[in-house]
């Protein structure tokens, strides 16, 4: 097949890890007879330096016309002033909004060879293989009214958690479809004992579940879910939840795998290109040293193959290459290895 992939490497280690993921995608194209065309665009701090804005309209338009977008990370100390009018994360938000990606997927799989890399006990981590699906464009972060004012002479602030039925339905449906191709279990996380949005969420989820009789649905309160994620993480398959709960639970789940540098993510919409990126940031402390772990970005490229290009065999081949490297400890220092960022990809390419 022919596919067009827009690359937005961003700042810090972003360009270092995206370059290695691109090498792996090229290897996939060569082995399976595909043609991948790339364009590269500035996003984040580097775009602010060059254009005065964190993502230009031209760069966004290019991403919108691609089959998929592969992102590194944005930000760094140079652009850290919280009061600045132009900030690196604005590029990310503009890109997510412009692509209409409403579901953020974070698969968490604990590799056998890394059972000792997590602060959690190895016997608890065995068989962890789950996906957290976080609603990305609604809820508390976007609801109105929002802001600060003065009431009765006191500073006062308000945020609003807000969802419509269709916003809940589209993300929950995606979670059920995902579960059908996995262990056939969905855990919907809410706070239905106190929040009206959660009661709506639960009602819609129950209705959607009727369309997926082969999938088991369980509801779980968010406080219970945060405990179970540590106590019995292997009991989960697909977890789906609203934006704020998902923000917190995805970070908690990422701890299970051992290193920030390992985990990929996919952000998907109804149609149009998906956005793929590692969960880590621009890691300014190690940028330019050649020690950044490229695996999170390479696994993001595997998700790109799976979800945007529907190339399941190719996606699995890339994941298998990562698995082999981890088993051989052909890794960067964050995983106790001695290899550089590009040497990790070299190793995978030799085995590929
Ligand atoms: P970070 O994820 O960049 O780094 C946290 C720690 O993990 C650092 O010690 C770093 O060296 C290490 N680390 C991260 N990725 C690694 C990799 N691939 N290999 C080896 N070690 C890795 O988070 P931090 O330090 O809080 O933020 C740094 C900058 O990144 C900030 O400007 C922040 O705003 C931005 N950021 C951007 C994100 C994005 O673009 N989606 C997400 C999170 C942070
Ligand atoms: Mg977070």
Image (cartoon, rainbow, N blue to C red):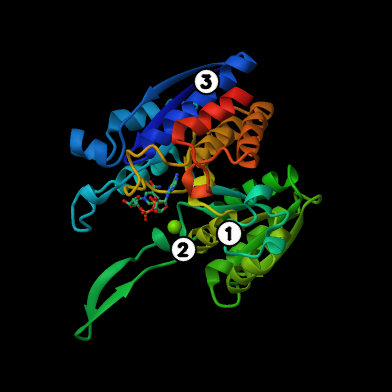
Q: Is residue 324 above or below residue 123?
A: above
Disc 2 residue crowd, few under 14, some 14–19, many 20+, Cα 10 Å: some
Observer-nearest residue: 120 or 173? 120
Q: Quadrant of residue 19?
A: top left
Disc nearer the start of the sequence (1/3):
3
Observer-nearest residue: 292 or 297? 292
Disc 1 residue crowd, few under 14, some 14–19, many 20+, Cα 10 Å: some
Where's residue 222, x and y in %? 58, 70
What residue did someone put label 3 on? 26
Observer-nearest residue: 129 or 177? 129
Residue 239 showing in the rendered view: yes
From this viewpoint, which residue is outermost toward the right? 214
Which dot, 3 or 2, sits closer to the camera? 3
Horizontally, is 327 left or right of 149 in the view? right
Q: Residue at x 46, y 63 (%)?
A: 162
Q: Secondary structure at mark 3?
A: helix
From this viewpoint, which residue is outermost toward the front? 338
Q: Which mark is residue 118?
A: 1
Q: Secondary structure at mark 2?
A: loop
């Amino acid at each position: 097949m022919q596919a067009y992939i827009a690359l937005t490497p961003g700042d810090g280690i972003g360009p270092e890890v995206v370059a290695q993921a691109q090498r792996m995608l090229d290897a996939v194209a060569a082995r399976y007879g595909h043609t991948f065309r790339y364009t590269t665009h500035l996003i984040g701090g580097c775009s602010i330096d060059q254009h005065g804005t964190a993502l230009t309209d031209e760069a966004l338009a290019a991403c919108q016309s691609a089959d998929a977008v592969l992102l590194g990370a944005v930000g760094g100390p140079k652009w850290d002033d919280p009061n600045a009018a132009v900030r690196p994360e604005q590029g990310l938000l503009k890109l997510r909004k412009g692509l209409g990606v409403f579901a953020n997927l974070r698969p968490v799989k604990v590799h056998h060879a890394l059972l000792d890399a997590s602060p959690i006990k190895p016997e608890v981590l065995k068989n962890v293989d789950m996906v957290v699906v976080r609603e990305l464009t609604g809820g508390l972060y976007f609801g109105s009214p929002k802001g600060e004012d003065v009431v009765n002479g006191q500073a006062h602030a308000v945020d609003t958690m807000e969802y419509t039925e269709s916003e809940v339905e589209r993300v929950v449906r995606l979670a059920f479809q995902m579960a059908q191709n996995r262990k056939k279990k969905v855990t919907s996380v809410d706070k239905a004992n106190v929040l009206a949005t959660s009661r709506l969420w639960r009602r819609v989820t129950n209705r959607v579940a009727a369309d997926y009789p082969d999938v088991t649905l369980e509801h779980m309160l968010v406080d219970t879910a945060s405990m179970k994620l540590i106590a019995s993480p292997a009991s989960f398959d697909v977890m789906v939840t609203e934006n704020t709960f998902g923000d917190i639970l995805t970070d908690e789940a990422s701890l299970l795998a051992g290193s920030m540098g390992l985990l990929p993510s996919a952000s998907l919409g109804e149609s149009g290109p998906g956005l793929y990126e590692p969960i880590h940031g621009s890691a300014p402390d190690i940028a330019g040293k050649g020690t950044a772990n490229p695996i999170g970005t390479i696994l993001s490229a595997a998700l790109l193959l799976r979800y945007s290009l529907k190339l399941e065999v190719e996606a699995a081949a890339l994941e298998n290459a990562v698995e082999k490297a981890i088993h051989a400890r052909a890794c960067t220092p964050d995983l106790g290895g001695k290899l550089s960022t590009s040497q990790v990809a070299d190793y995978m390419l030799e085995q590929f």
